[in-house]
Image (cartoon, grey):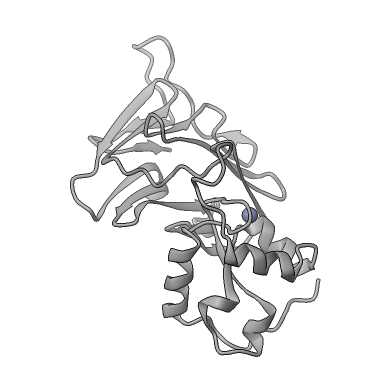
Amino acid sequence: MKEMNIPKEIPEKVKKTVQNRDHRRCVVCGTPIFEYYPLKKFYTEKPSSSNVVLLCPKHFKEARKGSLSEESLEEARLNPFKPEKSRLGEYEIDFQSDVVQLKIGSNHLMRVFMKEKDSFAAIKYRNFPIVKLEKKKEGLTLTICMIDNKNNITLLIVDNEVVIATLNWTIEYQNNNLIIEDEDKEYKLQLVIDSTNNEIVLTQDSFFFKGKRMLNLPPSNPFEKPKTITRTKGDGIVIG
Ligand SMILES: [Zn+2]
């Protein structure tokens, strides 16, 4: 695929405006993970919020390929996906509550955000926060960091924005299920965002690395210590 030459950067001020307008999610489907997509007119006009939209990685690829038309992008820009617009599969991470619960198998953690700017590393792997939630004025934002076995970052999503993606990732968000997977299926992260109970649920099958399940549930025998998962005081869960 021939990549479009990007002759100019999107100014930070424009990014901020676009982020707020598009509710930090894809304008087409509402996935809470986005990249900035410059519309065709961006290349001929002055950069502004009228020529940039937020798209999830899937729709970004489709737009690049042309299978998502410029007209439908323009339409989505004028009428971006809103959480209250649809009932099914709606984007539910803007918890207004200060309490977030995290369930991993039989581990049930609760985090109370004490102030407006507060963060919670829900899952850590070798000191890297894999899943982090941050409380901001606009609501709760999601940070996801995937690393390879050499500690190189292969995917970095900061406050819902894709910052680094060295592998070809598929990111799907459907019915409150967020599934992040690379093309070779070496990494997989799955989480359920449940705003009714203010919960983020990770199951035993939530996190795979090179086909290996990274989250082992604690054994039913309490005397047997789980080897790969530990809880830290007051905060999230540490793997490895
Ligand atoms: Zn999308």
Taking depth in this image into account, of 73 and 159 the one nearest to the observer is 73
Q: Position of residue 207 (x, y in %)?
A: 54, 37
Q: 70 left or right of 15?
A: right
Q: Which quadrant, please, contains the N terminus?
A: bottom right
Q: Is the residue 5 above or below the residue 163 in the image?
A: below
Ligand 1, what quadrant?
bottom right
Q: Position of residue 180 (x, y in %)?
A: 60, 46
Q: Which residue is drawn at the image coordinates 47% and 59% (left, top)?
A: 24
Q: Which residue is drawn at the image coordinates 48% and 70% (left, top)?
A: 18
Q: Which residue is drawn at the image coordinates 29% and 32% (left, top)?
A: 110
Q: How many marks?
A: 0
Q: Is the residue 66 above or below the residue 220 in the image?
A: below
Q: Which quadrant, please, contains the C terminus?
A: top left
Residue 4 placement: quadrant = bottom right
Taking depth in this image into account, of 166 and 64 the one nearest to the observer is 64
Q: Is the residue 39 above or below the residue 22 in the image?
A: below
Q: Position of residue 103 (x, y in %)?
A: 40, 28
Q: Position of residue 83 (x, y in %)?
A: 50, 47
Taking depth in this image into account, of 78 and 236 the one nearest to the observer is 78
Q: Is the residue 31 above or below the residue 10 in the image?
A: above
Residue 84 visible in the shown view: yes
Q: Which residue is drawn at the image coordinates 79% and 68% (left, top)?
A: 66
